[in-house]
Amino acid sequence: MLLNNTNLYGNDTFSCASPSVEGYRYFGVLWGSIVTIVGTLGNLLTILAFATDTRLRTRFNVLIVNLALADLLYCTILQPVSVDSYLHLRWRGGATWCQMFGLLLFLSNSVSIITLCLIAASRYLVVAHRTSRVSRLLLSHRGVAVLLISSWALGLASFGPLWPVYVFTPQVCTCSFHRTRGRPYTTILLFLYFFLGLGFVGLFYFLIYRKVRMAAKALIKYRPSRRSSRRKRAEAEGTDGDDSGIGVGTTATHSCEISDQVHDHSTSSVTELSGKAPTNTSDTQQIICQGTKGVSNEAKQLHKDPVPAPTQAPTPPSTSGEDNEFKRVTRMCFTVFLCFIGCFAPFLLLNIADKKNRAPQVAHMFCANLTWLNSCINPLLYAAMNRQFNQAYQDLLSKAFWPLARLWRKR
């Protein structure tokens, strides 16, 4: 982003050589090589794991794959070019490739930010508005496909118009857009993506945290009340069963107050107790007296609560496991977001503070090198914080190294 010269065809236009970075360039080459290898293998493993493991083929993981594609674009194509520039302290690809490099660089970054926003928004919709129409529409198969295509189209539409101002920037020894020629459009884009976009990601995760915390507090309050209600219900049932005098005494009263439906039900119960239909009134009364204890409790319950109130179904055991899994996945996504902030914040803050290009070139190059880590660190987080991705990575690596292990055993 930092360049005062605007002539792309000058003799020193594509050179970033300086005595202050002669030794640092080898550190940059080593750093960039590690990012290239780890990022390419890690993001490729993520895509292959999604394609081969049916457990990972969820609509949410499609967003993870989209993030991996953006990182793979950078690690496989762009990062080796940056390593070459650091090694020779010079851009060796020409003006057209420099413009293409700048466009692909910001396309990769913009798609990453958009995908982070989509991941955070999808997690929030699952927590707060899972059954809403908007949630069902956006999280459907067609909705996710539209979101993925839109993320790349929006990134290309945002940074495509800057094609004429992509130039080589000696301060970071790579190609980017010109610092002043693209204003105010470049300033607006940086604000929308890096500040407003990432701010919305942080807001979504804050809302998720608050929602989960409120649900946890409600669950803690619900459990004691549920225990006390069970205790009271047990005590009430014990009183009705033990004091048979109350049951007999209330039979006549309730039999006069309940509806004809209860009377019919009592008659059918009497028939079942006697084994045959009652022949006369006296026989019926005798049989009713014999079945008073069973019928009185039922009539008493029907009188108190003619229409039984719906009770909440007990929480299945799997719900707790699903909640824990949701928290783990959300924690992983939030960690990915924090790593993105940590990688880009020093570079952005240095460019904002150093408007007159007075900071040492080494400082600019080091802060730019921190942004490289963002493209290779995500697969490491998936492996460390998600057991399904971890298991899928292990299966893929074991299959890949199985021929080598077989050859080694033969020796």
Image (cartoon, helix red, strand yellow):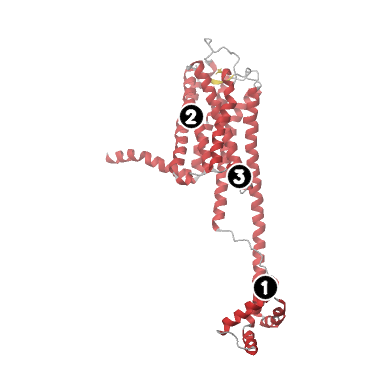
Residue at x 63% of width, y 84% of height: 288
Seen in the picture, residue 3 relative to 348 is either above or below; the reply is above
Q: Determine the CA span between mark 3 and mark 2.
A: 33 Å
Q: Mark 1 belongs to which amino acid?
A: Leu
The C terminus is located in which quarter? Answer: top left
Q: Quadrant of the N terminus?
A: top right
User: Which amino acid type is marked by label 3?
Assistant: Ser
Q: Which residue is mark 3?
A: 135
Instruction: Report crowding for label 2: few under 14, some 14 to 19, many 20 or more residues within 10 A (C-alpha).
Output: many
User: Where's residue 360, x and y in %?
Assistant: 59, 19
Between 62 and 22, the residue placed more toward the observer is 62
Q: Quadrant of residue 187?
A: top right
Tell me the number on the disc at residue 302: 1
**Between tags 1 and 2, which lies in front?**
1
Horizontal and vertical percent for residue 382? 50, 41
* SS at circle 1: helix
Placement of 394 over or under 30, stated as above or below: below
Q: Earlier in the sequence, mark 1 or mark 3?
A: 3
